[in-house]
Amino acid sequence: MSDSIVLEKARQAGLIITGLTFRSQDVRPGFVFFALKGANADGNQFVSDAVTRGAAMVVSSFAPKEPCSVLYYQSDDIDRDMADAAYEFYGRPSDAMKMTGVTGTKGKTSIAYLIESVLSGAGEKVGALGTVSYRIAGRKICSAPNTTPAALPLFELLAQMKKEKCSSVVMEVSSHSLELQRVRHIWYDTAVFTNLQRDHLDFHHTFENYFLAKQKLFENLADPANPKQNRTAVINADDPYGRRLLELLKGRVKTVTFGLENEADLKAENIREFLTHTEFTVGGVKAKINLLGRHNVYNALAAWAACAANGAAQEDIIRGLAALPGVPGRMERVDEGQNFFTFVDFAYTDESLQRAFKTVEPFKKGRVLLVFGCGGQRDRTKRPLMGRTACTNADRVFLTNDNPRCEDPNQIFTDILAGMKEFSNYEIVPDRAEAIGRALAAAKENDIVIVAGKGHEDYQIVGTKKRHFSDQETVRAFLRGEKHV
């Protein structure tokens, strides 16, 4: 029996389907065109274009606005039907590989990179899908438009990984992807829960909904229909939502806990922090990571547990954790010989800003200068919280644009400034390059400059235009004297 009602209807109509897409400009003869109604564009407006380009079938949540010359299917759940079609069309690729999913508000990217490092070092060919890029055996396939791709590109990527003989895939699983059924039909061997903090309330509306979306990954793992062997949930025992998950999973699936405070299967002790690396022990065994801060000890423990669940030996885990040089845009140090420290970090919530401050606090000899902003068309409730956190912890703040998108930058600043009313240690510099330059020009010996919010991103979105912009490149240019404020 077909997994996909869309492909079954195509077969019944005698159609030979050659591809699937939700972008009309990518349609080729024989394609199924899924007319998705998104936040910024409505695919239903491009049905005639898709048909002109050779679409054999159109799938939409709506009845056709005008007569359609090809097979037209009105779906009552287009996200589900798209995932079903992708799974079947691309040959059920995830069934043949060990699948590790990492979810949570913070830490997903670092954990995925650490797991990839360990498993690759142990001799496995690893596929990786996450916020920074999509990779096969360390080779970048492309930058990541989404943390977790939509179902069609996701299963196409998984099929490519299977074809190139990847034995394992590690992927960041976003709450959006779980809610929108992008990972439907992927049976996981291992699922990792990092933590739950305020984020994405513009999409989920309530914190409870946000948690329930994350929970779906673990329901997948515990589902009796999951055919994978040795299924393991790796859970942060120090996070209250992690403990809630443990209760939900009790007696249903194997669990492994990690943490620094509560009782856990993997507990780190003797933590020693440096501005270049972090050391700790687990059960008397010494480990080192080239990542900064106590939060990265959590990430290392999560990766350790996930890799062990995947069969990695302890010596391979220790070696693999230490082998990762760093994670793009995660407290990434930029050093051009200056007499102060500069870091680029992806922090875009008040909790992640606080974490960045805590990371550098033990080494503070001078001031902390912060450059940050907030993205447009995203959760507005976090903006004043970020403003307050910034001014409370930094000696000087340069408030600037992040990715304003189609929102008025002045409105974004107004929202942030609501949390900065009682402070005066800030200035507004709308141009991001200028703000970075001012912060670096103001830095003195032993100061610490943190450029936050965009991390690994090499673009800035203003209105509907996406232009090249890299915090790292901008910092280096100023430090080398190639740019001047």
Image (cartoon, helix red, strand yellow):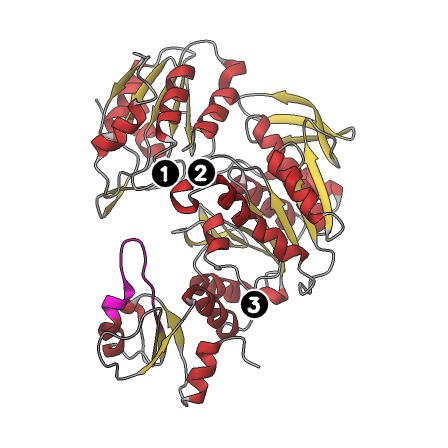
Task: Give me the residue at 42% from left, 32% from top.
Answer: 349
Q: Is 323 on the left-hand or right-hand side of 172?
A: right
Secondary element type, mark 1 = loop
Q: Is residue 85 left or right of residue 1?
A: left
Q: Quadrant of residue 293?
A: top right
Q: Image quadrant for the N terminus?
A: bottom right
Q: Position of residue 290 (x, y in %)?
A: 57, 31
- Tell which tag, 1 or 3, sits nearer the viewer: 1
Q: Amino acid at mark 3?
A: Pro
Q: Residue at x 75, y 42 (%)?
A: 314
Q: Which residue is mark 2?
A: 199
> Relative to residue 260, is residue 306 depicted above or below?
below
Counting labels gives 3
Whole-percent x, y for residue 364 in the image: 48, 12
**Residue beneath label 3, please?**
93
- Please state which amino acid type lies under the numbered disc 1: Asp
Disc 2 and disc 1 in contact, CB within 8 angstroms: yes
Q: Is 389 positioned to the left or the right of 422 in the image?
A: right
* Residue 336 visible (yes or no): no
Residue mark closest to the camera, 3 vs 2: 2
31 with respect to 130 (left or right)? left
Residue 231, percent from left and from top: 70, 55
Residue for badge 1:
379
What distance separates the C-alpha of mark 2 from that of mark 1? Answer: 7 Å
Of the image marks 1 and 3, the number of the one nearer the N terminus: 3
Q: Is residue 308 above or below residue 379?
A: below
Which residue lies at the image location 25% right of the left edge and 27% below the top edge? 414
In space, the residues marked 3 and 2 are separated at their CA atoms by 32 Å
**Which region of the structure is painted magenta?**
33-46
Q: Amino acid at mark 2?
A: Asp
